[in-house]
Amino acid sequence: MTKIGFLSFGHWRDVPGSKVRSAREALVQAIDLAVAAEEVGVDGAYFRVHHFAPQQAAPFPLLSAIAARTSRIEIGTGVIDMRYENPLYMAEEAAAADLISGGRLQLGVSRGSPETALAGYQQFGYVPDAADTNGGDLARSHTNVFRRAIAGEPMANANPQMTGTTGSLPVFPLSDTLPDRIWWGAGTRATAEWTAEQGMNLMSSTLLTEDTGVPFDELQAEQIERFRSTWEQMGWERTPRVSVSRSIIPIVDDESRHYFGVRAQVEGQDQVGHLDGGLARFGRSYIGSPEELVAELAADRAVRAADTVLVTVPNQLGVDFNARLLAAVKDVVTEVDAAPVPA
């Protein structure tokens, strides 16, 4: 059975039509939406992390608050830009959130995507080497230290005046199973293979930063296949998880038709463009009646290959609209699971 999560960017803006006009409203409504999503049977509440923008930027207070208000739903990120992170501080925050949730944290990390600030991570105090032009090596280095820290590796020498020993110390708290629940957001097939080599789960979005001329779902399905093949070659003992993101809008009432009915004609196909100096392929949106969506998603090879689908939500339309949207998506994906898998 495919797990369904929602992915929110946490936008807020004080403009006509927005039901999320401030940072406080964005945070409080995110908590309320997670509670509502759990009630309708959705499996995960995930949040995109952006800096220097009116969106969610500090995930751990939000995830901890959601954990305290819920009992079953997974809580996660999609993704944290590791160029901005202090790995040891993040290890403490992540472990605390995971312990509060009872082991429900699913943490997506990566190099991040194009952002509003020019090299904003440098203002956070992290300056990559001159040869590391986009900070990719910096992100991977921070991730390596973070993963070692959450696994309990010693990170500092003990002060013998305080501890009576000259040994070394890990960070605290620790959550024993958290290391198995780290996901890397991969934008290419090669990065998916690297993700498997590192023993992390795979998170793939509605964007791939490469293009081979085939439809988005086929390229993403190949990415997933390469990930799982490499995972098997590495001999890791546990079964990895794979998520894909999709924009799915069931047209079920006048309100959803008002907001999205016309967009179905424009966004119902892949888009190819330039991003970070190269070609990139953007996946289509799925907008239509539930019956239409079942047929279209059943033919999406990457959706059928993944174990988790993260549905991007228009959070500025408010909690009630998005709770109804997620309930409808849950019904659609349940029918998709029952449909034959494409040959």
Image (cartoon, helix red, strand yellow):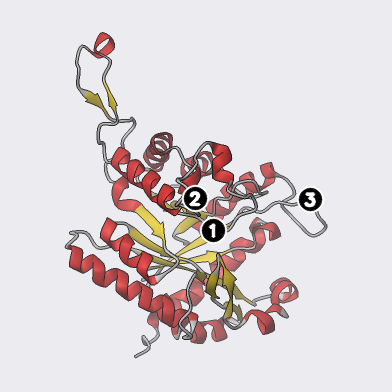
Above or below — where is 223 with respect to 90?
Answer: below
Q: Does residue 224 appear left or right of residue 292 in this picture?
A: left
Q: Are marks 1 and 2 in contact (CB under 8 Å)?
A: yes
- Residue extending farthest to the top is 161
Say the numbered circle drawn on residue 93.
none
User: Are the two marked residues, 2 and 3, in contact with CB atoms closer than 8 angstroms?
Assistant: no
122 over 133 or under it: above or below: above
Mark toward the viewer: 3 or 1: 1
Say which label, 2 or 3, has the lower sequence index.
Answer: 3
Q: Residues within 10 Å of mark 3 (few under 14, many from 20)?
A: few
Look at 48% across and 71% down and name the residue there.
208
| Residue 113: mark | 1
Pointer 3 with pointer 1, Cβ within 8 A: no
Residue at screen point 47% across, 74% down: 210
Pick the residue in front: 153 or 237.
Answer: 153
Residue 97 image offset from top left, x and y in percent: 42, 40
Identify which amino acid the numbered label 1 is placed on: Ser
Q: Which residue is mark 2?
A: 81
Taking the spot 42% from the left edge, 69% from the top edge, the residue there is: 188
Which corner quadrant of the image does residue 288 belong to? Answer: bottom right
Circle 3 is placed at which residue position? 14
| SS at circle 2 | strand
